[in-house]
Amino acid sequence: MRGIVLFAHGARDPEWAAPFQRIAARLREARPNLRVQLAFLELMQPALADAVAGMAAEGITHITLVPLFLAQGGHLKEDLPRLLDDVRRRYPSVTIHVTQAIGDSAVLTAAIADWALAQHLSFTA
Amino acid sequence: MRGIVLFAHGARDPEWAAPFQRIAARLREARPNLRVQLAFLELMQPALADAVAGMAAEGITHITLVPLFLAQGGHLKEDLPRLLDDVRRRYPSVTIHVTQAIGDSAVLTAAIADWALAQHLSFTA
């Protein structure tokens, strides 16, 4: 069994999570049999280790971890590898593939730029 | 004269800025006559006030400020309004329109979800 973890930063404001919940909902709609789970670096629950623990207990053996961060900085280069070392040690039956960040995708940076321009043009029309 | 400020969080790691620079480059390519400027909340330069000061000095009177944040939390609900109060007081000749965040766009959250699924499928092929 396979699953996706959408790994986001977390924030104090509960409303902050809404876009990430919408992304998860779209994935579940596209693939009803795929286990899709949010996890957070800080300030929100579940933490990554708890998310992986739950999925391992369900028998999931392959997880794609998608960092929902715009860019790679200390959180993805230092914090995430440290967390992954820990969960891989605790759940050796689970293989975790980590994808690039959002801003590493040329398609997504182009989509963001085009959206920004459309927003600008809507103010200047 | 009009311009766009792409307002991002900032980070210690200089490489963190690369996706935002790519977004700015695509906007400049799409609209060579449009002034496009990055600005950062913290840890990177220029700060928002410095970016607006430079654009005001060039005669720019209308700025679209695009928050390159995935979601609205304290940074956009509290920090940004405080910074905007200050720059609007200092540069009353400049009108600043603020757009939604990236994650407020249904088109962009769908694009992110579809990209995440494609990444997942590339591992499971």
Image (cartoon, coloured by chain):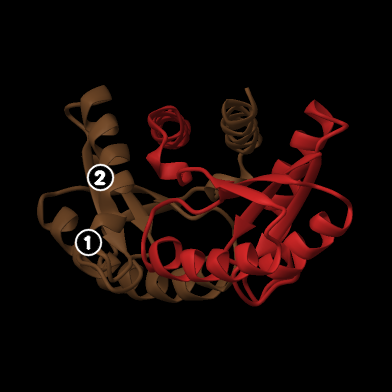
Chain colours: A brown, B red
Residue type, label 2: Gln
Viewport quadrant of the N terminus of chain B = top right
Q: Which residue is mark 1?
A: A14
In whole angstroms, how far apart are the C-alphas of marks 1 and 2? 11 Å
* Residue at the farthest front position: B92
Task: Tell whether B92 sits left or right of A102.
Answer: right
Which quadrant holds residue A30?
A: top left
The residue lying toward the viewer, choosing from A60 and B89, is B89
Instruction: Give the letter of the chain under mark 2.
Output: A
- Name the residue at 63% across, 38% down: A109
The location of residue A125, given as percent across then percent down, is 62, 22
Residue B78 position within the rendered picture, expressed as x and y whole percent measured from the top left: 41, 69
Q: How many marks?
A: 2
Determine whether the residue tagged by mark 2 lies in a helix, strand or loop. Answer: helix
Relative to B51, B68 lies left or right: left
**Residue that numbered label 2 is attached to:** A21
Nearer the observer: mark 1 or 2; the answer is 1
- Give the position of the C terminus of chain B as an image quadrant: top left
Q: Residue at x 68, y 46 (%)?
A: B63
